[in-house]
Image (cartoon, grey):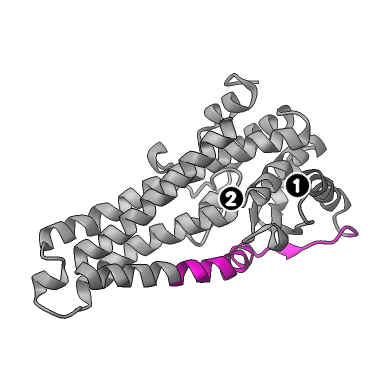
Amino acid sequence: MFRFMNNVKTFMLLAGMMVLFVYVGSLIGGRQGMIIALLLGGGMNIAAYFFSDKLALASMRAQPVSEDQAPELVGIVRDLARQAQIPMPRVYVCPPQAPNAFATGRNPRNAAVAVTRGLLELVNRDELTGVLAHEIAHVKHRDILIQTVAATIAGAISALGYILWFVPLGGSGNDRRGGNPLAAIAMIILAPIAALLIQMAISRRREYNADSYGAELAGSPLPLATALQKLHEYSRRIPMRVPLDSQKSMFIVQPFSGRDAADLFNTHPSLANRLKALIGREHI
């Protein structure tokens, strides 16, 4: 029931983001603006659908590993994929010392799971299993695609306002801005913020789902809970460069950029809330 309600909330948030996207286009550019919004959003989502995994892996300098190279890592992924009844994902290792992990790919048949060297050096086998079970949960539930679409729409909303404001669509200035230039200016400022907040809410819902199902796959919530504590503590000490802000949501813990962000704009739930959802209390 918990995961079902999270799925319903995710669907509603995605629908709200799409409505916001089209509304911004129509408000700023009228019917022509709405058409541009749909074309822009569709084009960006098609590109994200086919290329987001390649971009994510390349940006993290991820290297594929075989079972001969990393027998424990690949063996755990294989066992978890079998339990989850999904195809075996490709397995990658990334060079950063900041401990983290992510999954990518548009569907289970094209999925990849990646971990950083810092993670492999930090956690024990049980904790590694918990982390990888969390990532396999993302793959099974197609969270990567959902979060990619949300991030893409959020980025498109930010770009849309500027495109429609500066590119003439015909007619008078007021006509091409939907007849209300002040409202258009307000939407250029406020719509990206609203889209970002919706994207953050979607990301947090999916993290709770992956924690819950990952704990089931691992056989116990405790290994994932202790791993999350370690990752939270150590990742706050070691900044990790992520080329695009939209990629932060794909990691198991939010990468530390060297500065603390307001909770409102965090892509992940707080550690306390994740532990409480996993094991019913805030600390082990």
Say what secondary structure mark 1 lies in. Answer: helix
- The percent coordinates of residue 259 (x first, y second) are 44, 45
Q: Seen in the image, is 167 located left or right of residue 90?
A: left
Q: Which residue is mark 1?
A: 120
Q: What residue is drawn where x is 57% and y is 40%?
A: 207
Q: Which residue is mark 2?
A: 143
**Range of magenta residues:** 43-68
Q: Seen in the image, is 115 located left or right of residue 142?
A: right
- The percent coordinates of residue 11 (x first, y second) are 47, 46
Label ID, residue 270: none
Q: Quadrant of the C terminus?
A: top right
Q: Quadrant of the N terminus?
A: top right
Foreground mark, 2 or 1?
2
Q: Is residue 101 visible?
A: no
- The percent coordinates of residue 12 (x first, y second) are 43, 44
Camera-side residue of 176 and 99:
176
